[in-house]
Image (spheres, grey):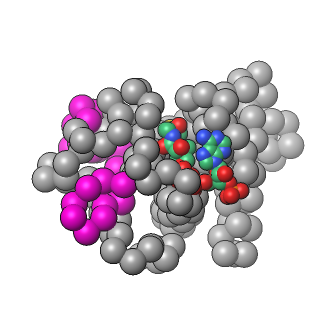
Amino acid sequence: MSGVALPQGFSLQPLQRSHPRRQFDCGQGEVNDWLHTKALQHQDKHLSATKVLQVQKGVIAGFYTLATGQVDFGDLPSDLARKLPRRALPVAILAWLGVSVADQGQKLGNLLLAQALRDCHEAGQTFAFVAVILDCIDDRAKAFYQRWDFAELPGNPYRLFLSSQTLAMMMAGS
Ligand SMILES: CC(C)(COP(=O)(O)OP(=O)(O)OC[C@H]1O[C@@H](n2cnc3c(N)ncnc32)[C@H](O)[C@@H]1OP(=O)(O)O)[C@@H](O)C(=O)NCCC(=O)NCCS
């Protein structure tokens, strides 16, 4: 599997029970709670997959969680929906992403988002989807994602999407 270059001393791994997930703090209670209490259970049930960015001493510097889902044809912007069938459509979901407070501001969020999108793109070669969707937790998170060409879904300002076409162009240029 191809990946973005990690800074020296960092590794990216699927979440495991041995990871010290309860010590993770990104400053957002809901995001912390997901990693502390739900991410592993959902992974065990094949509902979502979480990858953690670890530093050598084992501390989790960041993580992201991907899942699959559906959106209704009518929820997509007309330029994207125009050529698509009028039914529920498959999407990839970037469900959660966080960087520990101690490590924020060092581009790790960008790095995790780049890798999450790369994972989506690679998975899309086998299990196709029309867009990557995410729900923003607040305006700060929204600003973070909008730097990456995510756009609002009509009538839902905190639900953002990136079409698979745009994703493919991004990956071709990276
Ligand atoms: C949002 C978050 C992941 C950013 O991580 P980070 O490692 O500090 O971000 P980076 O250092 O990679 O910065 C990436 C870019 O986003 C910008 N940015 C960083 N945090 C930002 C924020 N809170 N709001 C807006 N922009 C932000 C940076 O200026 C940078 O811009 P640039 O690439 O143009 O220079 C991190 O602040 C976080 O975990 N927040 C709490 C959890 C959360 O909100 N998660 C998202 C919703 S699930």
**Residue at left offset 80%, top offset 36%:** 77
- Residue 136 drawn at (x, y percent): 59, 32
Residue 135 figure quarter: top right
Quadrant the N terminus occupies: bottom left
Residue 32 figure quarter: top left
- Residue 12 drawn at (x, y percent): 35, 65
In this picture, residue 107 sits left or right of residue 84: left
**Residue at left offset 26%, top offset 56%:** 59
**Residue at left offset 36%, top offset 43%:** 48
**Residue at left offset 51%, top offset 73%:** 4
Indicate yes or no whether the magenta region holds residue 98.
no
Indicate yes or no whether the magenta region holds residue 39.
yes
User: Please, which residue is most extreme toward the left here?
Assistant: 18
- Read off the magenta span: 36-61
User: Please, which residue is most extreme toward the front here?
Assistant: 102
Q: Is residue 97 above or below residue 172?
A: above
- Using the image as rendered, state which of residue 87 and residue 43 is in the foreground: 43
In this picture, residue 94 sits left or right of residue 42: right
- Residue 26 drawn at (x, y percent): 42, 40
Quadrant the C terminus occupies: bottom right
- Using the image as rendered, state which of residue 4 and residue 75 is in the foreground: 4
Residue 92: in sight, yes or no? no
Q: Is residue 121 above or below residue 18?
A: below
Q: Is residue 76 above or below residue 162?
A: above
Residue 49: in sight, yes or no? yes
Mark count:
0
- Residue 55 drawn at (x, y percent): 30, 64
Q: Is residue 7 above or below residue 137?
A: below
